[in-house]
Image (tube, coloured by chain):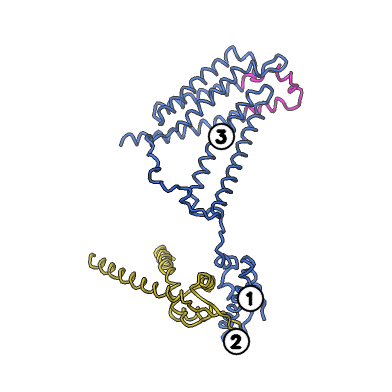
Amino acid sequence: MNDMDELFANQTLELRRGTIVLAILSCLKTPLYGYGLLQTLEQAGITVDAGTLYPLLRRLEKQGVLESNWNTDEQRPRKFYHLSRQGAQLYGRLVAEWSQTNAKLEVMIKQGETNE
Amino acid sequence: MSNLPQRYAYAVVRNLPEAQREEVSRELQATIEDMASDRAKSGKPTEADYKAVLKELGHPDHLSHKYTASKRYLVGPRFYDAYLRLLKTLLSIVPGIVAAVMLAVGFAEANQPIMATIIEAIGTGIMVGVHIAFWVTLVFAILERADIKPEALEGADWISQLPQVPKSTKRQISLAEGVSGAVLIALGMAWVALSPMINVKDGAPLINPELWNFWLPVFFVLSGLSLLQEIAQAKVGNWTTTLVVTNALLSVASLVFLVALLSTQQVINPAFAEAWGWNKSEGFDEAMRWTGAITIATTVGIYVWEIVQSIVLNRRFVRGQGK
């Protein structure tokens, strides 16, 4: 990997870091278990390490953003996560914030292009 | 069925608080089974599938770090700057002072061998340094965990407490450096001068009395000049060309004197050695030769280092003046 690629990889990581939570919350209006969530994200083109996702889910649960239930009906017991009421509120505000940031950045990028 | 999922889950949760272990372990095991089954496509996952899954999840310690919020460091970034600043300040001052005091006290005491005093002083200085490092680190490690905000240490009114820019930012020789050098030389001169009174055994002084005819007067002249040199350096604060030249001349002269003294004269009074019974013990002459050689080697090293350093700094200083 040359310097440019490495730089790009690092910056991409920084850009994505904050968006993972948003992506997770967007999936959890209906309950999903960890691995199911991982696959849903993957299908949407968002790659998250299992080693990052599970601790993150646990932290969000501890913060009251997510709630969980164990489903023992199937052959494997699975922990299903879904948004709490507080989590749904948080999600709404984060989406609004994201749209605003996105809009501002679009404007700035356009301005940058015309100034070239 | 493989026991890898259980073992991996155990390796992760054993570092977690008791209350979380059961749940995290169950969830992890289910996940590993899911991932392994996915890998196997159809049929039962093999040992190799499990291994591939665990590799993807990473070392259990890393995963458990992500689960715990606890601090896996002694001093974190919030306090690191303050920590380093305090450590540097204390380490640069306290061990030196302690060692110097011990040297002074040791030299003042009559019957203490010089080498023993020096070794003891250096050893104590190092011990004090180790203690400072340990205790400062401990205090900061506690602060880090005591839920104290860095603002509490920094003070709310830090704007008015911003340091003044030192006037002589371009000083190359600090005042402390110059003064401590001068004090050391003065102490050395005082010790030699007082030696006939304080270092005496059965009427025999430690320093060979014959040396007073020629060698010791030269020693005092050279030391006096070195003292003036140190004072001048402290006063000027920079390695001007004049100071570099006088320092180099004095160093060479002192070195020539030292080599000549140690190789042609008996510095330790034979009568004094006899009074202690040193010369009866085997290897006394050998030990004296070695002491002389080590002294010369150390002195050469220090002088050469200082001369090289002074030339480098002089270049920088002259360049700075030119601008």
Badge 3, how many Cα within 10 Å: few under 14, some, many 20+? many
Residue located 60% across and 39% down the image: B128
Give the residue type that dot 3 points to: Gly
Number of marks: 3
**SS type, badge 3:** helix
Give the foreground label among 2 and 1. Answer: 2
Give residue A69's position: percent from left, percent from top. 56, 80
For the stretch drawn in magenta, the main secondary structure is: helix
Q: Residue B115: x percent and y percent?
A: 65, 29
Residue to which mark 1 is pinned: B5
- Report the quarter where the C terminus of chain A lies: bottom left
Residue B239 image label: none
Answer left or right for B200 relative to B129: right
Query: Chain ID for label 3?
Result: B
The blue-coloured chain is labelled B
The quadrant the N terminus of chain A occupies is: bottom left
Density class for disc 1 (Cα within 10 Å; few <14, some 14-19, many ≥20) is many
Q: Residue at x 62, y 39 (%)?
A: B127
Relative to residue B78, is residue B47 depicted above or below?
below
**Residue B316 appears in view:** no
N-terminal of the pair, mark 3 or mark 1, is 1
Across and down, in percent, residue B276 comes to 74, 21
Q: Which residue is mark 2?
A: A74
> Taking B81 as reference, is B181 above or below it?
above
Looking at the rendered structure, the secondary structure element under dot 2 is: loop
Mark 3 lies on residue? B96
Graded by Cα atoms within 10 Å as few (under 14), some (14 to 19) or many (20 or more), the crowding at tag 2 reads: few
Q: Colour of chain A?
A: yellow
Along the line of sight, the residue nearer the viewer: A25 or B260 = A25
In the structure shown, which secondary structural element does the residue marked by tag 1 occupy? helix
Q: Inspect the magenta stretch and tell me whether residue B165 lies in it.
A: no
Alpha carbon separation for disc pair 3 and 1: 57 Å
